[in-house]
Image (cartoon, grey):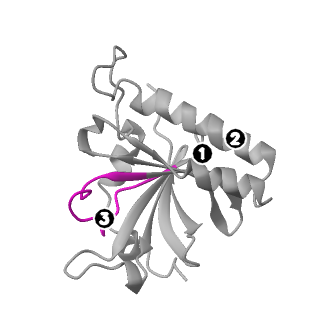
Amino acid sequence: MTASPPIENVRVFHRTGQWCPGQRIGDVVAYDARLLPAYQVAGRPTIDRSYLLLDQGIQLTRPVAFVEPVEGWWYVDVVEVDESQDGFVVHDLYVDFLVPPGAHRYHVLDLDELAGALGDGQITAAQCATALSRTQDFINRHLRGAEEGSVDPPQQFPPASIAVLELLPCFYEQLPGIDG
């Protein structure tokens, strides 16, 4: 029997400019980010939990600010992640997905932003190729068969690798002083 990888406390630099507390198990990092006031919805939680699939270049979030008709949907970013002694820094590669509960269908977003970023020199051709490869890999691993009428078997979404981290309490409560 193989031992489970240890849980490691980590920090992730979020695009909002904050260092966020999190935990890592193997190739998966979960972290909590405080929503900026402009994105908060009255009566809703103010902290999102995101999951980085380090080996796939994917970030998954079920935004707490999503309300009907997309409440409960997953927002998926194709990303690059740099790891340093300070923590993980996530770089968005522009391609995003919206995946509803049950993953019976999905929406690919922002390919035009990817093209624009490449055309404007904001990303390299290699980064664009990485984004497109990761997009296809994500579809093949997690969503293929999700389309109605598909002959492919449905994949598991969200990935089973995040299950343990989904159950953990808020990292701001568990790991005081790690943010900032």
The quadrant in which residue 68 appears is bottom left
In terms of sequence position, does the residue under pointer 2 or pointer 3 come before the other? 2
Question: Residue at coordinates 63% horizontally, 38% vertically from top-left?
Answer: 132
Q: Is residue 127 above or below residue 172?
A: above
Range of residues picked out in magenta: 59-75
Report how far apart the C-alphas of labels 2 and 1 lie in the structure: 9 Å
Q: Are marks 2 and 1 in contact (CB under 8 Å)?
A: yes
Q: Which residue is mark 3?
A: 169
Which secondary structure class fits the magenta region best?
loop
User: Which of the labelled discs sits on residue 57, or is there none?
Assistant: 1
**SS under mark 1:** loop
Q: Amino acid at mark 3?
A: Pro
Along the line of sight, the residue nearer the viewer: 83 or 157: 157
Residue furthest top as drawn: 151
Report how far apart the C-alphas of labels 1 and 3 lie in the structure: 25 Å
Q: Is residue 143 left or right of residue 111?
A: left
- Can you say which quadrant of the picture contains the C terminus? bottom right
Q: Which residue is mark 2?
A: 130
